[in-house]
Amino acid sequence: MAYDIIYVPRVQDEVVIATFDTLEEANEHMEKIKSENPKSHNHHYIQERKETVWPGEDSGIELF
């Protein structure tokens, strides 16, 4: 499972700023953001990336 760190600016849409393989790595990066820029830390959050299957992607089942 992958985890994204997302930044929420005031005016624009949310932006993924980093992606990590483990939640621990994502939390470590959030601590780094908090120590380097405490004011912006409140505008970041961690979200679990959901694996999606796109329509038309081969699922392994033949459609008749």
Image (cartoon, grey):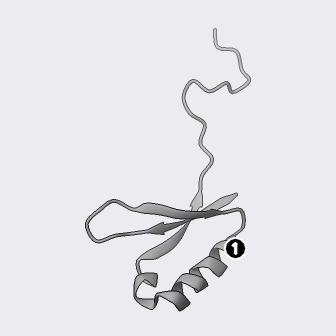
Residue 39's image quarter?
bottom left
Describe residue 14's horizontal placement relative to residue 32 as left or right: left
Residue underneath mark 1: 25
Describe residue 63's horizontal placement relative to residue 38 as left or right: right
Identify which residue, 37 or 47, lies in the foreground: 37
Q: 32 above or below 17?
A: below
Q: 22 above or below 42?
A: above
Q: Position of residue 64 (x, y in %)?
A: 63, 8
How crowded pointer 1 is (Cα within 10 Å; few <14, some 14-19, many 20+) is rated as few
Q: Residue at x 57, y 80 (%)?
A: 30
Q: Position of residue 54 (x, y in %)?
A: 56, 33
Identify which residue, 38 or 64, lies in the foreground: 38
**Tag 1, which secondary structure?**
helix
Single out the residue that lies furthest toward the front.
Answer: 36
Tell me which amino acid carries mark 1: Glu
Q: Residue at x 62, y 77 (%)?
A: 29
Q: Position of residue 3 (x, y in %)?
A: 62, 63
Describe residue 21's horizontal placement relative to residue 43 as left or right: right
